[in-house]
Amino acid sequence: MSEIHSGVEFGAGTTDETFDLEQEPATKKIEGRTPWQLARARLRRDKLSMVALVVASLVVLMAILAPILDAVGILKPNDFNPELIDPALGGYPIGPLGGMSWTHPLGVEPGTGRDTLSRVVLGLTFSLIVAISATLIAVVFGTVLGLIAGFLGHWSDWSISRFADMVLAFPVTLMLLALSGMFIDIIGKVVPNDNVATGLYIIFVLGFFGWPTFARIIRGQVLSMREREFIEAARSLGASNRRIYFKELLPNLWAPILVYGTLVLPAYVSAEAALSFLGVGIKPPTPTLGNILANSVNYASSVPIFFLVPGLAIATVVLSFNLLGDGLRDALDPKADR
């Protein structure tokens, strides 16, 4: 009887254990990931793009903080230091490497003794203001016209496409030089500051001549989407064109908008620097990376560090944003195998 009793107890225990196992899920729940989560995962695996993202973020943060640091007196971009230059040597900085010291880590400007680090950091702010503003104009204007041309088609597409062809036919640099005097004078009647008027002129011209390329990109994307099921469903439900633009099409275009913005912004930073060499850029004492580099060319052989600092600053900004744009383009491509 004892053996039978123990066997019954063992059988009961086995039944309980089996019941407990049946309460556990056979497999774990599989969670889906959004396109943004997939893109972020691909971007994180790209080490070079992550380094570019960190550098670009630091550049933007530095540009934001520079005016604040200037206002509280930490940066002193316009303070002359005649004791740090040698008039007998033509105004060259006293000391090695362009007058580098703990007070002036990147040396001082020949002829004036102004702190190079302060001027480069504040110049980064003004250069990015010009580049970001021109990029926003090109992106917004190009997005709107690209949406209209791609979705409506017919005469709207033909008119916008021909207008874009006409704008692309004009050389940007030549137009900037040819129209600078007239338009800066016109803007100067509204804005009394000459440098502000010049900056607004550069922003407007770069943005105006930059939208056609982006409009063509958006137009091509819209042409491939306007016949898809979700657009047909919106039309059948009576959605207006405005709702289709902003609720159906635009959310599917954020990837090319983001990629194009990060690629065209460094091009505008370089354009601002190039215009300073041509005499159209913002004039000193307001610092920009362009006019600092243009001034440093005169001292490239005698004080090379003064030439290298703004040159490396421009190269860092352009390279970081270009690499970030390339990384975003690969990460946002659903067919990318990274």
Image (spheres, helix red, strand yellow):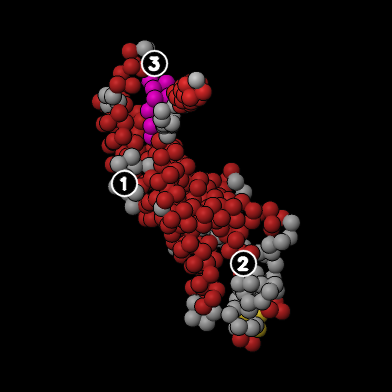
Specify the amino acid type for callout 1: Asp
| In this view, the mark in front (1 or 3) | 1
Specify the amino acid type for callout 3: Ala
The secondary structure making up most of the magenta span is helix
Q: Visible in this render: residue 150?
A: no
Q: Residue 270's spot in the image, x, y percent?
A: 44, 58
Q: What residue is shown with label 1? A: 337
Instruction: Find out whether residue 245 is within the magenta segment.
Output: yes
Give the extent of the magenta segment: 240-253
The residue depicted at 58 percent of the width and 80 percent of the height is 97
The residue depicted at 69 percent of the width and 64 percent of the height is 76
The residue depicted at 51 percent of the width and 45 percent of the height is 133
**243, above or below 162, in the image:** above
Specify the amino acid type for callout 2: Leu
Q: Give the farthest residue toward the top.
A: 237
Q: What residue is shown with label 2? A: 117
Q: CA distance from mark 1 to mark 3?
A: 37 Å
Kindly check if marks 1 and 3 are in contact, taking CB atoms under 8 A apart as contact: no
Instruction: Find out whether residue 17 is within the magenta segment.
Output: no
**151, above or below 60, in the image:** above
Q: Earlier in the sequence, mark 2 or mark 3?
A: 2
Give the camera-side residue of 177 and 58. 58
For this view, does 46 lie left or right of residue 110?
A: left
| In this view, the mark in front (2 or 1) | 1
Q: What residue is shown with label 3? A: 239
Q: Residue 225's spot in the image, x, y percent?
A: 30, 28
